[in-house]
Amino acid sequence: MYLEEVKTLLTDVLNLGPAGAALDAGSPLLGALPELDSMAVVSLIAALEDRFGIMIDDDDISASTFETLGSLADFVAQKSAQ
Amino acid sequence: MTLAPAENFFLPGAHGRRYCLYHPARGAARAALLYVAPFGEEMNRTRRAAALQARALADAGCAVLQMDLYGCGDSDGEFGAARWDIWLQDLALAHAWLAERSGCAVGLWGVRLGALLALDYVRSHESAAALPVARLVLWQPVLRGATYLNQLLRVRLAADMLAGAEGGDSRRLRDALRTDTQEIGGYALAPQLADAIEALDAAGLGVPAAPVHWFEVTAAADRPPAPPAVQLAAAWRAAGAAVHLQAVHDQPCWATPEIAECAPLRAATTAALAEAVHD
C-alpha cells in the first residue's frame, strides 16, 4: 500500500512522468535518478511529511532510507506505525 | 503596438552595482511590479518562469523590474557578503527607480524567501515619507524563516548523503553556522544572513495595508492551499486586509530539477493583476 503511494509522490515531486510508473520496489533511487539531487531530497522529505503526517529526522537522511523505492516505502510504513 | 524588448542596465547601490532588467509595459503602464527573487538555487530554477511572467505582465500593461540583489546573479558582491539589510536597501533603490520610470505606484512580487523579504520590506518601510506599496503578489511565500533555514541545512545534509557521507546533523550544522560561513547547495551562507532569516516570521510582520494576491502551488487539481497559508490569510483578512489566496495546480518551478515554466501560475497571476488594475 505504501509502495504505490510513495511511488506516486516521488513521481510528482521529481516530475518523472511515465518513467515513474515503471519503478518497482527494487528500483534504485540514490545514484540512479539524476532528478534526485539535494534539493529534491529535501522537497521529497517535506512532501512525505505532509502526505503521511510523519516527522522525518536528520538521521533518516541516509543512504539506507533512499537506496531503493522499496526501502523508502518501508521507511514510510515504519514511521507511520510509530 | 508591439511589446518593447526588456532593457538591461546597472544601478549604483551600496557596495557596488546592481544588475537590472526592466520590462516596459505595452503602451502606457497601468501598474508596476518589482520582482523579489527567491533564495540561492531556488532563484536559478525560477529564472525562466519569472522571465516569462514578467513578459506576460508587461504585455498586459504592467511594467516589471527585476533586480539581482547584492551578491546575487550578475550584481556586484559575493553571495557570502550578502546581508538581509543590504537587500532591504536594494529594494528601496529599485522601488524608487521603478516608481519614477513607470509613473505608477509600485507593487512587490515576491517568490518564496523573496516574498518574506518583500513583507519585511513593507513593514520596515512604513514611514510616512516612504513610497507607497500598491500591492503584494506572493508566490508560495516562505512564512517562517526558521523552518526555511532548517530546510537549507537539510539540503546540505542531503548533498552530503548523495556524496556518500554519513551521519549529518542539522543542529551541529546550525551551531557551526553561528560563527562560520557554511556552504549550502553551492552558496556561501554567512552567519548574519542565517540569523536574519531564522528570526523572521510572516505572522509577526504586521498586516499588509496593500491588497495581497497570494498564490500557492498544489500537486493536485482540487487540493486547497497548505494550512499555514490558509491560517495567515484568514488572520490578515480578520484584521482588515484584502487578501486573495488562490491555489493553482502547477509545478513548483523553484524546486523542480527540470526547468518548469509554470503556465497555469502565470495565467492566474496575469489575470489577477489585469483585474486589479481595472478596478
Image (spheres, helix red, strand yellow):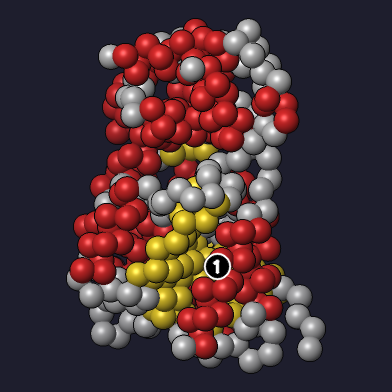
In the rendered image, the vertical position of residue B26 relative to residue B39, given as above or below: below
Residue A64 seen in this snapshot: yes
Find disc 1 in the rendering and name its residue. Answer: B269
Q: Is residue B17 left or right of residue A65?
A: right
Q: Position of residue A55 (x, y in %)?
A: 32, 24
User: Residue A48 appears in which quarter of the rendering?
Assistant: top left
The amino acid type found where label 1 is placed reads Thr
The residue positioned farthest toward the right in the image shown = B2
User: Residue B240 appears in which quarter of the rendering?
Assistant: bottom left
Q: Which structural element holds mark 1?
A: helix
Q: Position of residue A70 (x, y in %)?
A: 55, 10
Q: Looking at the image, which residue is at 56% across and 34% down? A: A13
Q: Looking at the image, which residue is at 67% across and 53% down? A: B261
In this rendered view, identify the residue nearer to me: B120 or A60: A60
Give the chain of mark 1. Answer: B
Q: Is residue A77 left or right of residue B232?
A: right
In this rendered view, identify the residue nearer to me: B215 or B161: B215
